[in-house]
Image (cartoon, grey):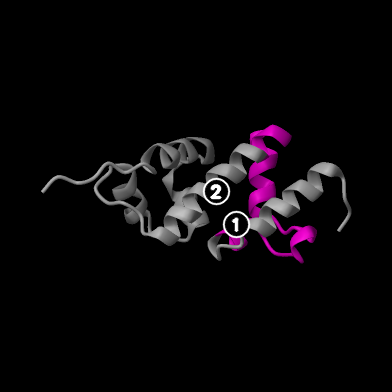
Amino acid sequence: MKTAVNPYSEELELLAGNFGGQNRVAKILDVDRSCLTRWVKQRQIPDPRNQEKIVALHHIWVKLMTIFQPTTAMKWLLGINAHLSNHRPMDLIQQGRVAEVLAALEQGDTGAYA
């Protein structure tokens, strides 16, 4: 039985390259690294919830790269954020609360204070 092409494979590979490996991507997405490996190697397509998280993380990372250098962008993603009521953006991505993360990113980019 032939496996369908995984359209998320390329996004995951780009994220892994930017984040220093699949381990960090798996941690941010809150999935087991073995799942991520299967998705990247197109052995399995992510479930709908994880599809949303992958697309969201990729979108947020692209936006971060327009504002910050990679090291600072990663600190923003993993650090506590006052615009998110002192939550970490990665935690909200895991919960599917992407709109809040994007709003916080926009607030920070425009210089708004929390």
Residue that label 1 marks: 90
In three-dimensional space, the C-alpha distance between marks 1 and 2, rounded to whole angstroms, equals 9 Å
Observer-nearest residue: 10 or 24? 10
Tell me the crowding category of disc 1: few under 14, some 14 to 19, or many 20 or more residues within 10 angstroms, Cα based.
many
Q: Residue at x 64, y 53 (%)?
A: 78
Magenta extent: 64-93
Q: Is residue 11 above or below residue 45?
A: above
Q: Secondary structure at mark 1?
A: helix
Q: Amino acid at mark 2?
A: Leu
Q: Residue at x 63, y 44 (%)?
A: 74
- Camera-side mark, 1 or 2: 2
Label located before the other in sequence (1 or 2): 2
Q: Residue furthest left?
A: 1
Q: Residue at x 70, y 64 (%)?
A: 87
Residue 61 visible (yes or no): yes
Q: Is residue 10 above or below residue 3?
A: above
Q: Amino acid at mark 1?
A: Met
Main SS of residues in magenta = helix
Residue 68 visible (yes or no): no
Q: Residue at x 27, y 41 (%)?
A: 5
Task: Measuring from the top left, give residue 97's x and y in whole percent.
Answer: 61, 62
Q: Secondary structure at mark 2?
A: helix
Task: Measuring from the top left, give residue 96's x and y in whole percent.
Answer: 55, 62
What label sits on residue 46 in the rendered view?
A: none
Observer-nearest residue: 35 or 52? 52
Residue that label 2 marks: 57
